[in-house]
């Protein structure tokens, strides 16, 4: 099943812009970019994303809190979440996976391969369902 | 062993009650006074005092006096006067008072003393009160002296035999016998036996000789009378005395003689004097021969003796008629002779006794004196030793004593030497101990100064049971307790958060598979490994928690036994705070740097991909340079974070036994795009696909990627990089060989150092952070492996990794199956 709608939550505007080009223009997804966890929680139900790409370090609601808030929305409870982080500590990666993320992508990411990577991760979750 | 049986009899006596023994001795003493041993003529020994003396030795003075007084009362019955009783009682009283006092244990000498003192009084008493002649009185006294001393000697010898018998003497509580007394008694007994016996036998012989002479004379007179009787015609009975009296008158007869003629009708005619033996009413039995007649009317034997008569009955014929001539003589003259002899013998005996006692006393003293002197000198040895004086041993001319004296003197001299040596050694030792004590005190105060100076550390020492023995100034400062509150009273457990101790104990319990509890949780690891450093939480007296790093060391004595434990704790709260701050800082920096970098890199990649729009060549080149450098910046940040974690020891790296080939392939995959940029080819040669090692997959890939990146970086365009994975010396060996320019010799020692780049001065900047090989080395060694290189400048380099070979699973299975 092909991935169509992705919600990207990222406080940094530049990265949101670059990611939009990489995911929309290069990979051809339908994208909702949110600049904060709160905004993501507010819009998520309407957009009903098939995959959520979530930055870890954000002011106010950080990635973990946003994940918890999103999981509290019944229709989003099973949407796969991929974390994106500049932290590279193995222990922390495992922490995010334990919290329910399906993968952690390091920053800087490879923009040309990002779409393929997300597609691949999405397919894995579909197969396992 | 008759003596032993005898002795056992006495032993049985010893268990009888005291009063019954006194009674027994009294009765025996009384009875034995009637047992008379005739020694000389009219001199009999009696033995009552033997029991009084035995009572003295065995039962004591009071018992002896009772026995003595009772036993002596027999003499009143024997002699009809109380004087002997008085004398014997005095004798036993004297002995009772003197025996055992002033070391006087020689009964014989004591008794002799008594008689010497009492002699004039007794003689006077007998002479005046009993109206005896002086000679008689002297004789009586001499007899009593010899009898008394004889009895004393008997008892002394008997007691000496008891004293020589170990069990008996112990049972009867008798003292040891001195050599002097033993010699004295032996000499006296032997001398008396050999000297007195002839005197006594001689006395017996002289009585017999006297009586034989009397018998001969009476027989001779009777024979003359019988011869003449034949010449006289037998007259009518009325004329008889007048016919025979002239004849009798012609006989050589003395005044007190009596002669009578007895015819066959037992009628007798008194011819001379008055025959007393035939003056009785009852008929006499006429027996031929000599007889000694004593009148039964006298109660005392000596009186009977004095009034006794010698009788000779001679059978004769007178004109064919059998008649008897009975010739009598009074025994008084013989008694007088015998008494004189007896008195002389008694005097001789007493003199001999006195002499013998004197000589025995002197000899025994002479024999034992040198020994006593040696004994006294020997007792001085100890005192002389302490005063460091030489002990002078007595000189003697007797060989054995001289030898003993000499030996003792030598022994004393050697002892003196040894004693002085030991005293010198003692002095030296004392000096050493003093010096050592001073040194110890100095070292102790130094240690205390050091321990007090280490005020930032808590230093606590315990005994093997964990009880605190030392609590440093630093510990007081850190924990708020005073040393005296804890020393000897508590274990360090009370300074810890109890839940932490319980958890640690559980951990150790599982790890060591043995029960660990309380204080043991602090020391058990240290006991196994010598020392252990562990993070704990101390509790200040106020309750405040203090995170510490505690190093516990086992203190052992010279024999290796644990004598205590030393715990040195460092307050790590500041360190932890700094660490936390650093981590936060690194996380922030990492995030803050990467966020813009992510945007830059992603933008450049998108632009350079050409998917956004066509670029002119110059723009494209510049944007490529920008992209490469943003990529380099990313690597630099990654490397910096890596090296920081490696250095701080925070790197979490679980190891797992796994095949190395897939890791090698993954690493090659990772650098493929980079290699393609420079048209670099790889030749991979895996000699054994089963090669396994205990490694962390992700980190080993990182290490191989580092080596491959370097190889690509330094290889000329289009070159080949050779990878070989093989087994060498039980190790998995991976070699990466490039055809680059190699490493200059001067750089080789620094190649694994941080920020060291071989090409720093080179014209061709290859990029890189200068941390790659340092990280490679750290990671490899953390996984237990080794990294190295062989390189010749101008010819290329070979970098290698080596890990201990892990057994392939198939082999393990073979072994277990």
Image (cartoon, coloured by chain):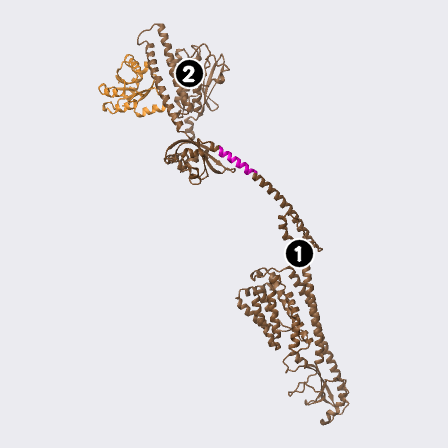
Chain colours: A orange, B brown
Mark 2 crowdedness (10 Å alpha carbons): few <14, some 14-19, many ≥20:
some
Q: Position of residue B673 (x, y in %)?
A: 38, 13
Residue toward you, A85 or B100: B100
Asked if badges 2 and 1 are on one and the same chain, I answer yes
Q: Can you say whether B117 is above or below B225 in the image?
A: above
Q: Which residues, given as a range, are shown in magenta?
A: B435-449
Quadrant of the snapshot with the C terminus of chain B:
top left
Subunit that carries the residue with mark 2: B
Marks 2, 1: nearer the viewer: 1
| Local secondary structure at mark 2 | loop
How many neighbours does mark 1 have within 10 angstroms: few (below 14), some (14-19), or many (20 or more)? many
Q: Is residue B618 visible?
A: yes
Among the 4 quarters of the image, the one containing residue B485:
top left
Please give the residue where the numbered disc 2 appears in the rendered image.
B769
A84 w.r.t. B292: above or below: above
Q: Is residue B73 magenta?
A: no
Query: What residue is disc 1 on?
Result: B371
């Amino acid at each position: 099943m092909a991935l169509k709608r992705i919600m990207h939550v990222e406080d940094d505007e530049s990265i949101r812009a670059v990611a939009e080009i990489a995911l929309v223009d290069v990979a051809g997804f339908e994208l909702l970019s949110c600049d904060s966890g709160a905004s993501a929680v507010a819009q998520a139900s309407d957009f009903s994303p098939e995959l959520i790409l979530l930055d870890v370090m954000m002011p106010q609601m950080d990635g973990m809190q946003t994940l918890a808030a999103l999981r509290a929305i019944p229709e989003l409870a099973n949407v796969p979440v991929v974390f994106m982080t500049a932290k590279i500590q193995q222990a922390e990666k495992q922490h995010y996976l334990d919290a329910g993320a399906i993968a952690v992508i390091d920053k800087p990411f490879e923009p040309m391969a990002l779409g393929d990577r997300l597609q691949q991760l999405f397919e894995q979750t579909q197969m396992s369902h | 062993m008759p003596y032993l049986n005898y002795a056992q009899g006495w032993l049985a006596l010893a268990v009888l009650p005291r009063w019954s023994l006194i009674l027994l001795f009294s009765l025996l003493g009384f009875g034995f006074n009637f047992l008379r041993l005739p020694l000389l003529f009219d001199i009999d020994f009696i033995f009552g005092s033997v029991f009084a003396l035995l009572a003295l030795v065995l039962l004591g003075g009071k018992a002896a006096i009772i026995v003595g007084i009772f036993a002596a009362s027999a003499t009143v019955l024997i002699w009809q006067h109380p004087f002997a009783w008085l004398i014997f009682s005095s004798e036993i009283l004297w002995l009772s008072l003197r025996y055992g006092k002033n070391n006087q244990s020689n009964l014989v000498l004591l008794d002799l003393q008594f008689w010497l003192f009492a002699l004039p009084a007794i003689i006077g008493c007998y002479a005046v009160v009993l109206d005896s002649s002086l000679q008689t009185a002297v004789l009586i006294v001499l007899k009593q002296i010899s009898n008394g001393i004889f009895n004393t000697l008997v008892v002394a010898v008997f007691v000496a035999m008891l004293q020589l018998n170990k069990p008996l003497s112990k049972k009867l509580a008798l003292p040891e016998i001195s050599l002097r007394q033993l010699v004295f008694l032996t000499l006296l007994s032997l001398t008396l036996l050999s000297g007195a016996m002839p005197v006594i036998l001689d006395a017996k012989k002289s009585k017999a000789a006297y009586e034989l002479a009397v018998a001969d004379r009476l027989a001779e007179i009777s024979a003359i009378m019988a011869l003449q009787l034949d010449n006289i015609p037998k007259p009518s009975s009325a004329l008889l005395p007048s016919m025979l009296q002239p004849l009798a008158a012609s006989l050589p007869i003395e005044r007190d003689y009596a002669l009578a003629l007895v015819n066959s009708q037992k009628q007798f005619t008194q011819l001379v004097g008055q025959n007393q033996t035939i003056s009785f009413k009852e008929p006499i039995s006429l027996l031929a021969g000599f007889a000694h007649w004593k009148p039964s009317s006298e109660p005392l034997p000596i009186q009977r003796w004095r009034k006794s008569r010698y009788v000779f009955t001679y059978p004769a014929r007178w004109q064919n008629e059998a008649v008897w001539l009975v010739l009598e003589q009074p025994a008084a003259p013989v008694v007088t002779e015998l008494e004189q002899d007896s008195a002389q013998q008694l005097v001789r005996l007493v003199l001999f006794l006195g002499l013998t006692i004197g000589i025995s006393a002197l000899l025994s003293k002479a024999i034992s004196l040198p020994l006593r002197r040696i004994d006294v000198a020997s007792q001085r040895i100890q005192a002389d030793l302490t005063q460091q004086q030489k002990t002078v041993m007595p000189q003697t001319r007797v060989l054995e004593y001289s030898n003993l004296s000499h030996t003792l003197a030598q022994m004393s001299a050697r002892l003196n030497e040894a004693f002085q040596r030991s005293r010198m050694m003692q002095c030296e030792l004392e000096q050493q101990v003093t010096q050592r004590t001073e040194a110890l005190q100095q070292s102790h105060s130094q240690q205390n100064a050091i321990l007090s100076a280490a005020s930032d550390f808590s230093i606590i020492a315990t005994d093997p049971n964990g009880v605190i023995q030392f609590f440093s100034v630093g510990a007081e400062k850190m924990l708020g307790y005073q040393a005296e509150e804890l020393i000897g009273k508590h274990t360090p457990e009370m300074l810890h958060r109890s839940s932490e101790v319980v958890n640690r104990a559980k951990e150790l319990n599982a790890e060591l598979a043995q029960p660990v509890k309380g204080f043991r949780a602090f020391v058990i690891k240290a006991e196994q490994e010598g020392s252990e450093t562990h993070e704990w939480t101390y509790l200040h007296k106020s309750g405040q928690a203090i995170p510490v790093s505690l190093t516990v060391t086992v203190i052992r004595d010279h024999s290796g036994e644990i004598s205590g434990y030393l715990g040195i704790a460092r307050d790590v709260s500041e360190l932890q705070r700094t660490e936390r701050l650093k981590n936060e800082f690194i996380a922030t920096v990492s995030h803050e740097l990467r966020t813009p970098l992510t945007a830059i890199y992603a933008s450049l990649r998108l632009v350079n991909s050409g998917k956004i729009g066509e670029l002119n060549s110059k723009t494209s080149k510049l944007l490529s340079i920008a992209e490469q450098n943003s990529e380099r910046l990313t690597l630099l940040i990654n490397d910096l974070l890596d090296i920081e974690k490696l250095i701080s020891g925070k790197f979490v790296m679980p190891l797992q036994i796994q095949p190395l080939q897939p890791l090698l392939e993954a690493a090659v995959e990772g650098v493929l795009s980079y290699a393609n940029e420079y048209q670099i080819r790889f030749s991979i040669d895996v000699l054994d696909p089963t090669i396994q090692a205990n490694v962390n997959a992700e980190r080993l890939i990182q290490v191989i990627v580092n080596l491959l990146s370097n190889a690509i970086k330094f290889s000329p365009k289009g070159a080949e990089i050779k990878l070989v994975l093989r087994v060498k010396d039980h190790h998995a060996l991976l070699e990466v060989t490039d055809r680059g320019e190699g490493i200059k010799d001067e750089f080789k020692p620094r190649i694994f150092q941080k920020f060291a780049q071989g090409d720093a001065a080179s014209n061709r900047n290859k990029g890189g952070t200068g941390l790659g090989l340092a990280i490679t080395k750290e990671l490899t060694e953390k996984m237990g492996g080794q990294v190295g290189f062989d390189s010749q400048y101008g010819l290329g380099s070979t970098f290698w990794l080596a890990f201990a070979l892990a057994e392939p699973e198939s082999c393990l299975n073979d072994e277990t199956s």
